[in-house]
Image (spheres, grey):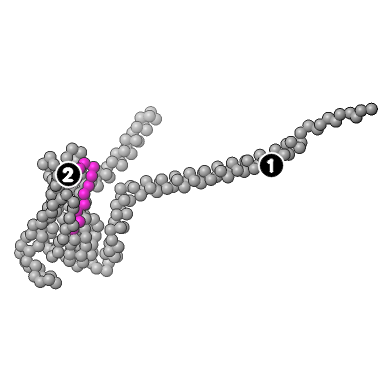
Amino acid sequence: MRLRLGTILIAAAAGAFAFPVAASAHVTVNPGTATQGGYTKVTFRVPNERDGASTTKVEVAIPTDKPIASVALRPVPGWTAVTDSTKLATPVKTDDGELTEAISKITWTAGPGAEIKPHQFQEFDVSLGPLPDTDQLVFKALQTYSNGEVVRWIDEPAADHPAPVLKLTKAGTTTARTTSTGTAAQDANAVMNNGKAGVDGTALTLGIAGLVLGFAGLVAGLLAYRRAGQRTPATAASGPPRQSTPASL
């Protein structure tokens, strides 16, 4: 009965650890928050979810209902990037003049050997701005695999295939100030979510505990050695008295 209970508990624990990993393996935009009216660099993180196929193409739609005047791409080694533009139904006034068309889609295609292989991910950096006066930007994405499969990341956040969402806050708000600190805090938070920080913290705690126990053992050994050295002369002095040899007559 105990063996069966132990097996059930182990299986339940394994399932609990496996579920968050499977649920979090989707296309995301990082950081998840930016400031309205400002410029920001976002990173589209694309993991490979298939064991027997590689990701060969990534397409991200840029919203045009709230158009973004400036969209710039950082080159990714081994990948080519192409942008598509759409003519706006209503021109938008910007500091550089009237905007009549805007970039509506970015397509990254992998060259030979640059594909996102199983159990790997790739990041694609994009500079955007000025960001529109809206609560969020939804970037619908398509992920194409080498076996021809296409995964559509276009659904609501709670769905199985959620689209990447960039939350926008008004300038001067607490959230906006927090996200303006840069990507270092974002990367630290990602490490925490992946559980690495917890592992490192446990290792550090065990290491400190080991040092403390080792030091305590060393002190105990020295004290024991010192007591032994102090008892030896006393024991020799308290031994049986010598018998004196009678004096000759």
Q: Quadrant of residue 117?
A: top left
Density class for disc 1 (Cα within 10 Å; few <14, some 14-19, many ≥20) is: few
Residue at 94% over, 27% down: 249
Confirm whether residue 180 shows in the render. yes
Residue 113 image label: 2
| Residue under pointer 1 | 230
Residue at 17% over, 64% down: 129
Q: Quadrant of residue 144?
A: top left
Amino acid found under the numbered disc labelled 1? Gln
Amino acid found under the numbered disc labelled 2? Gly
Q: Position of residue 228 (x, y in %)?
A: 66, 39
Which element is circle 1 on?
helix
Compared across the picture, whether 76 is left or right of 85 comes to right
Quarter containing the N terminus: top left
For residue 226, above or below residue 192: above
Q: Position of residue 244 (x, y in %)?
A: 85, 30
